[in-house]
Image (cartoon, rainbow, N blue to C red):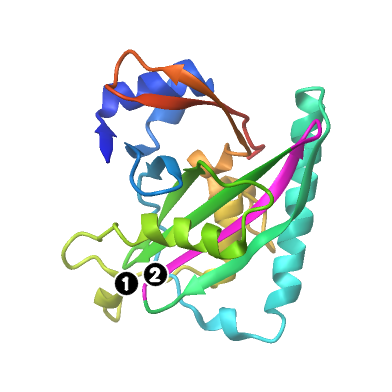
Amino acid sequence: ASQLGDEGACKLVKELWGWTDESCKYIDKLLVSTAPNVDTVVIETPQKIGYVEYDDWYKDNKDEDIAELAEGYKELYEEQGQRKNAEMKWLNWIVYPTLVEDKNYMYYAYLMSDDGQVVPVIESMVYDRNGYVKFAIVPQNLTASSPESEFKNTAESVLDIYTSDSGQGYQDFTQGDKIYQYGVIGSLAALSGIAWKGKSKAAAAGIFGMILVFAKKLWWLIFIPVIALFKRLFGKKD
């Protein structure tokens, strides 16, 4: 894998994805070619909102909550399409939201359409003692027809390489630590950039509050010694 420094990462996202200087402060690391089927990974600065408990993942109404999040996605894409004068739609889950409790991470994948071009999107986060860290995984060689297992393997191949700082892992929680009041479903909404049961969209701030779709072309990057895939990034309303 190749890692860009702060200046190189900011230059990439500004020149190729149209981000602003304000966006750059949310980038912790930007990695290239970390694993098979992975083009680029953007790791956001940690969200220290409190320890996320998993209890509500096992409630009977979890699927209803996730269906509500899907409706939120549809609204966000419709709004985004109106801003860019295009038809944008959330289509369906490729990988249903998945909590891997023994490894303390969450991920999902879905298909969206941008003026008829169907694009797969992978979103994910790793939980730690203080909250979570969000990952934007830009796939390559994966399409709408790729099997679910390939998307799962791609997400997990990235998340498995991340290690929390010593004493800051999810398992290091101590009584008295701050607890996130919206639970794991609320954190899933934050990953999506969607308001959740009284929690404003501002609580979902950061890079993932702006990511919708990556479209790709081959492009020479003059500031890193690789050929990277050119991506257009469209901001999610936050």
**Magenta stretch containing residue 106, yes or no?**
yes
Instruction: Measure the alpha-carbon separation of dots 2 and 1.
Output: 8 Å
Q: Position of residue 161 (x, y in %)?
A: 29, 57
Specify the quadrant that holds the C terminus. top right
Number of the front mark, 2 or 1: 1
* Left or right of 201 in this view: 47: left
Image coordinates for residue 210, horizontal then vertical, percent: 58, 37
Residue 129 relative to residue 55: left or right: left
85 or 189, which lies in front? Answer: 85
Q: Residue at x 64, y 51 (%)?
A: 200
Residue at 40% from the left image edge and 42% from the top image edge = 41
10 Å neighbourhood of mark 1: few (<14), some, or many (≥20)?
many
The residue segment tinted magenta is: 103-117
Query: Residue 166 magenta-drawn?
Result: no
Q: What's under tag 2, amino acid-wise?
A: Tyr
Of helix, strand and loop, which mostly describes the magenta segment? strand
**Kind of element beneath mark 2:** loop
Contact flag, marks 2 and 1 (Cβ < 8 Å):
yes
* Location of residue 10 by image quarter: top left
Please tell me whether residue 139 is drawn above or below residue 96 in the rendered image.
Answer: above
Residue at the outermost top position: 222
Q: Give whichever of 165, 227 is nearer the camera.
A: 227
Q: Position of residue 130 (x, y in %)?
A: 33, 63
Closer-to-camera residue (6/187): 6
What's the amino acid at mark 1? Tyr
Which residue does the image show at 20% across and 59% down from the upper left? 165
Residue 170's disc number: 1
Name the residue tied to disc 2.
Answer: 51
Can residue 109 be seen here? The reply is yes
